Image (cartoon, rainbow, N blue to C red):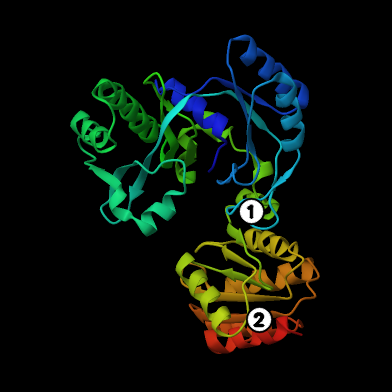
Amino acid sequence: MKIHEYQAKEILRKYGVPVPGGEMAMTIEQAETAAKSLFSAGNAAVVVKAQIHAGGRGKGGGVKVVKTLDDAVARSKDILGMQLVTHQTGPAGQKVQRLLIEEGSAIDRELYLGLVLDRASAKIVFMASQSGGMEIEEVAHATPELIYKEYIEPAVGFQPYQARRLAFKLGLLPTQINDAVKFMTGLYKAFVDTDSTLMEINPFITTKDGKLLALDCKINFDDNAMFRHKDLKELRDLAEEDPLEVEASKYALNYIKLDGSIACMVNGAGLAMATMDIIEYAGGKAANFLDVGGGANQEQIENAFGILLSDKNVKAIFINIFGGILRVDVLATAVVAAAKKLNVQLPIILRLEGTNVEEGRKILAESGLKFEVGATMKEAADLAVAAAKG
């Protein structure tokens, strides 16, 4: 689960991590009030920042530094409601529905801090780099030696000596080391307490007067841990997510929308990935990733069909099931019932293997509906690609 920058900064404040003062605004009037308050407090500059779940907002025109109230209002009008296009949103962009009106900072240096779970070592890794203010992926690709890492032992947690080591590698001043240790320790505690999967401070800045600030913050949470964090779950902004993905989450379906024309319904994430690959190999493109899970029931399959049919780009449906926990005859019965109930007109191609596969194929054959069944994944994929091309 992703959250906005302003929400992430509120969390950091609770852990003693210094962030610039600011307020979220959903209207021009709220933006003006927030900017007026910041200028009245003696700030020479105010920053108007678009709040969307994507990076690269500055390059896309979603971050503006202003020095007067009139400019703050004008820039707020420009950004609020705009379709902001960044390298992470894709060409369609994302509509800006919230702003963060924040006090300006006298930046001396732009650095980077980040925490992520490293699955290879089964440890949280704390990363730091002097190349802040730019895409960390570019730094990792071009100059990986400029990213410093500290692996954290789960039994002992993040240690002060590790924070000091990162601080020295960042080239911080001796007078900033102790503050940096507190800063990083607060980040680590926030990361663990909130069941985060990613926490990035980019840029992590030093100011002209020697202070340390989280100028930007990105936090992603583990969806599977949200039952422990009802307060965090309320931070979810459904307007930032694809409507079909939101709908799928209501029925415990793992769905991700893609830009192809062949809808996929599969049981198991690995098989779903293989299905998308073989569709590509056959000359087509998958319209989605959809894992109905090992124990899907008829209601879930009906809902899955409804979600697939809601995508106007879909020209054919490819169902690839290996019956284990989910028996093939149960799946076939549910598919027939769903197809009849929803009056599905699109071609449906199936590849079925596993428990009770012959019974399942018989149910499909006697349904009176025009299903096509491939004997192998490759044969089924070829049928699906041909059907999608008409």
**Other residues around mark 1 within 10 Å, as few (<14) / some (14–19) / many (≥20):** some
In the rendered image of this protein, does residue 238 appear above or below residue 86?
above
- Residue 230 makes an appearance in the image: no
What residue lies at 27% left-to-right and 26% top-to-bottom? 173
| Residue bearing the label numbered 2 | 349
What residue lies at 63% left-to-right and 59% top-to-bottom? 300
In the rendered image of this protein, does residue 256 appear above or below residue 47?
below
**Other residues around mark 2 within 10 Å, as few (<14) / some (14–19) / many (≥20):** many
Q: Is residue 184 left or right of residue 195?
A: left
Among numbered discs 1 and 2, the one appearing first in the sequence: 1
- Quarter of image, res 236: top right
Please, what secondary structure does the residue beneath circle 2 have?
strand
Kind of residue sitting beneath label 2: Ile
Distance from disc 1 to disc 2, alpha carbons, whole Å, reads 23 Å
Please, what secondary structure does the residue beneath circle 1 have?
helix
| Residue bearing the label numbered 1 | 245
- Quarter of image, res 48: top right
- Residue 161 makes an appearance in the image: yes
Q: Position of residue 201 (x, y in %)?
A: 43, 36
In the rendered image of this protein, does residue 239 appear above or below residue 208?
below
Q: Position of residue 149 (x, y in %)?
A: 27, 45
Q: Is residue 59 left or right of residue 155?
A: right
In the image, 386 versus 50, the foreground residue is 50
